[in-house]
Amino acid sequence: MSTVFRLAGLLRVRGIEADAKAAAATAAQRRLQRAEARRAGIHRFLADDAGSAPIDAASLAAIAASRASAAGMMAALGGAVAEASEEREHAERERTQALREVRVVEKLEARHRVAHRHRAAAAQQAHADEIVAAHRARRDGMRATEELR
């Protein structure tokens, strides 16, 4: 097994994808906030206009036309808000999925590092065992020659 994590490129790509999905989710959130702000502005306009008293029939007709137009705008903005909300939820789901995919590769990388450390420790232990065995063999050989003398 190599000491190089072969999926490092994939991890970088997944990280870039996750960043792009996060940016898309943020942009969708901003669009939703703008649509809600426009809808609230129209709502405030309609509420503020309720207290004014018309002076003549022409003013009353103008107010009625204005309210009808504003009501149409409210309906359109309601649809825009709903669409922006769905878009934001979709972008958030995609961001969450991208983060999951990054975590999967990160876990694989962590397992790779642990396996590499275990292999390195096993190699060091084997080397230490060889040194000890060689030392014992020399020591036992020295004792045998001393006994022969």
Image: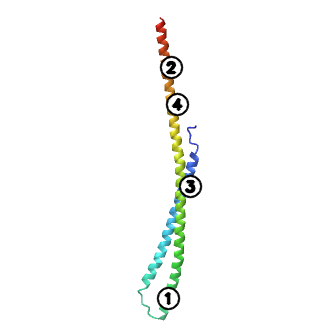
> Which of marks 3 and 1 precedes in the sequence?
3
Residues at marks 2 and 1 touching, judged by CB atoms closer than 8 Å: no
Q: Residue at x 53, y 41 (%)?
A: 112
Name the quadrant containing residue 48.
bottom left
Q: Distance between the residues labelled 1 and 3?
A: 51 Å
Q: Which residue is drawn at 50% across and 37% down?
A: 117
> Which of marks 3 and 4 precedes in the sequence?
3
Tag 1: Cα neighbours inside 10 Å, few (<14), some, or many (≥20)?
A: few
| Residue nearest the observer in this picture, 36 or 124 | 124
> Which of marks 1 and 2 precedes in the sequence?
1
Label 2: which secondary element: helix
Q: What residue type is labelled 3?
A: Glu
Q: Position of residue 54 (x, y in %)?
A: 44, 91
> Which of marks 4 and 2 precedes in the sequence?
4
Residues at marks 1 and 3 touching, judged by CB atoms closer than 8 Å: no
Which of the numbered marks, if any, corresponds to residue 123?
Answer: 4
Viewer can see residue 139: yes
Q: Which amino acid does label 1 sit on?
A: Ala
> Which of marks 1 and 4 precedes in the sequence?
1
Which of the numbered marks, if any, corresponds to residue 17?
Answer: 3
Residues at marks 4 and 1 touching, judged by CB atoms closer than 8 Å: no
Query: Compared to 104, does 21 lie above or below?
Result: below
